[in-house]
Amino acid sequence: MKIGMVMLRHPPTRKSPIMPEVVRLLVDWGVTVEVIYPEERVTDLANVKPEHDLYVLKSGSELALSLSAALHATGANILNPYPVAAALRDKVAATRILLAAGVPCPNTYVTSNPKLFATLLDAGPLVVKPYRGSQGRGVHVVWDADELDDITADCGPVFAQRYHKPEGVDRKIYCVGGQLFGVLRAWPAKTYAEKLGEPFTITPELKTVALRCGQALGIELYGLDVIISEGKPYVVDIASFPGFKGVPDAALRIADYIYAALQRVLEGHSAVLPMPKEVAA
Amino acid sequence: MKAVVIGPGRIGCGFAGELLHSSGYDLTFVARKPEVVRHLNRVGRYRVKLTSTTEQREQVIGPVRALWTQDTSAVSGAIAEANVIATAVGPQNLALVAPILAAGLERRRSPANVLAFENLINAGSWLRRLVRNAVHGANMAEDHGFSGALVKRAVTQKRGSIASDEPLEFIGDTPSSFVVDATSLKKPFPKIKGMVTTKHFTAWALGKLYVFSAGHATAAYLGSLKGYHYIHSAVRDPEIRAAVLAAMREGQRGLEAKFGWETCNGDKELEEIMARFENALLSDPIQRVGRDPRRKLGPKERLVGAARLAERAGVVPESLVLATAAALCFCDPEDPSCTELNTLIRNSGAGAVLEKVCGLDQKSELASSVLKSWGQLAPGWQPGNQLVSLERRMWAWG
């Protein structure tokens, strides 16, 4: 039983205890785990082939995604599947998939010239984000047209969503193997305790929304950022394999899920199970 | 020496067959499915892989042969000539094999010993009664020995395909002993590696049921509530681990009060059992361990029986009560026992289940405790939902 865990090494100052614990549990359970840091080695593309029963794509770096694309092309089993992980890295693609599935998202726009958003500001502020951004980096709420002058399109398309004033703190919804976990978290979280947030019981409406996202994308390991505004939920971000901070026993649950996915692969099945039909749009 | 094993499943092959083969017996299996018979006769062997946290060993069992249950003449002939006969068919199938056994035993000229490797406390006497009924009450059954066999090993997986020419592989943990009832067997006792005879079989049987099986069931039913896939994952969850240990301690204290030292080995026994539960190489799924909750919730079974015994000893069986309430929530659409139980709860309520299935008077203290615990769980219980916190009874959604 061999797993290749594709990861990005974080600075030692960053507190991220979940993945080392996931690896430790899998090793304890008899799995051979190779942690692969693509940025720290030279990969000979001629030799890229499946060397593990399952690859776990934790890193969302450009190199990790490219390496996963190469592995995917050779038939490797990857969790989350490469095409989905790639789509989720691109907010334009991901949001379109979610909208098509009937997931409530704010009105969403994309352009290569941020100044063109000016006319949209008549209807209210916009949240402008890097289209391949993550963890809240580079997010701006734009109220006036002159603020658009500060936004460049140097890094590719500019992505904007209608701003809805959130009620209370943000809601994070995490999915591990189809199981949902809600965490209330202040944004921006300043301390580690704030990052951990507080578990909450997800409402039936949010449950349907969250499961519908997974079904639309065909994955079971993801996280959503949801805001509630005027009583309505809006999915404002989705990530493949997020940090799962604040999920009780997160490492154990993730390891259990990966182990089950590995067993499915070893029995000749897909690593990912189809989502229940009840959440179909 | 010849042995007949009825039921070439996980315990039949992965335990009884392995020990009989190691003890020098020629093995003949009796199977219900003709394709299994064809496979065993074609391949002539199978593998047993035993694993613990400290060792792994593998053995090829063979040559073996197999007979189809419908080939009554050949089967009864094999039973008539066997030095020992074993069954490993599951308690619910014993009635089906009784006529087969009876036909073979009737042809014998000497007493035989039948060992029932079944997860049933009174498997020996039950099988004897079924055989007696199969020959219309004739006394023939009294000429032979019938004993349950308490299996120490968990055989969790069968790998391979009967369509293939490759031998099947059975995966289990390393314990290699089993306990039989000396008072219900005929002498001379069969010589089988790992066989322990006792005159206190009931105490041993309850010892296994109310400690190991109670802990296993607690891990499965609470593990299911928290959404885990495997026993080895569930017992790593601090809340579940504490409950499993507490449930087994409650079982031990009840047994100690009733039988004294013989069945209880205190914390050492619990540590050994927890190490077995933690063994991920068994890949023991929660769904497998939890299946057939209707039977497992029976009045003398691992949870309710253990709780009643503990209560009688003055122990409050808090964790066994919690596990019983969790068992009422267990859901597996592919398990008829489970769907039957779920329907009964939906139509008649948990109180009625406690009466009909668990044999508990709804007004009893134990039933009240289970109902209280069930009342704390039930509001959030829905298929697919999972507990985020057992202590806070906090559900993921609802």
Image (cartoon, coloured by chain):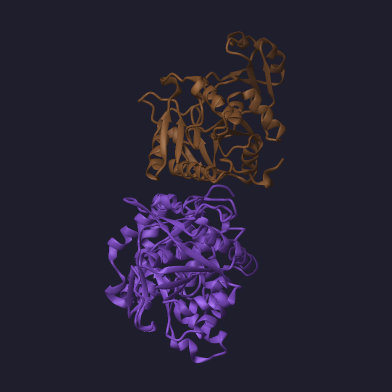
Chain colours: A brown, B purple
Quarter of image, res A202: top right
- Position in image of residue A157 (x %, y %): 63, 15
Q: Nearer the viewer, residue A194 or A18?
A: A18
- Position in image of residue A88 (x %, y %): 59, 28
Q: How many marks?
A: 0
- Position in image of residue B384 (x %, y %): 59, 51
Residue ID at (33%, 68%): B194
Is B362 drawn above or below residue B289 in the view shown?
Answer: below
Q: Nearer the viewer, residue A84 or B117?
A: B117
Q: Nearer the viewer, residue A127 or B349?
A: B349
Quarter placement of the C terminus of chain A = top right
For residue B19, say whether it is visible. Answer: yes
Residue ID at (42%, 67%): B16
**A235 displayed left or right of A135:** right
For residue B360, say whether it is visible. Answer: no
Quarter placement of the N terminus of chain A = top left
Residue ID at (44%, 57%): B219
Is B110 drawn above or below residue B177 in the view shown?
Answer: below
**B391 displayed left or right of A93:** left
Residue ID at (57%, 78%): B73
Q: Nearer the viewer, residue B158 or A192?
A: B158
Is B263 drawn above or below residue A174 in the view shown?
Answer: below
**A52 displayed left or right of B189:** right
- Position in image of residue B268 (x %, y %): 28, 61
Quarter of image, res B152: bottom left
Quarter of image, res A152: top right
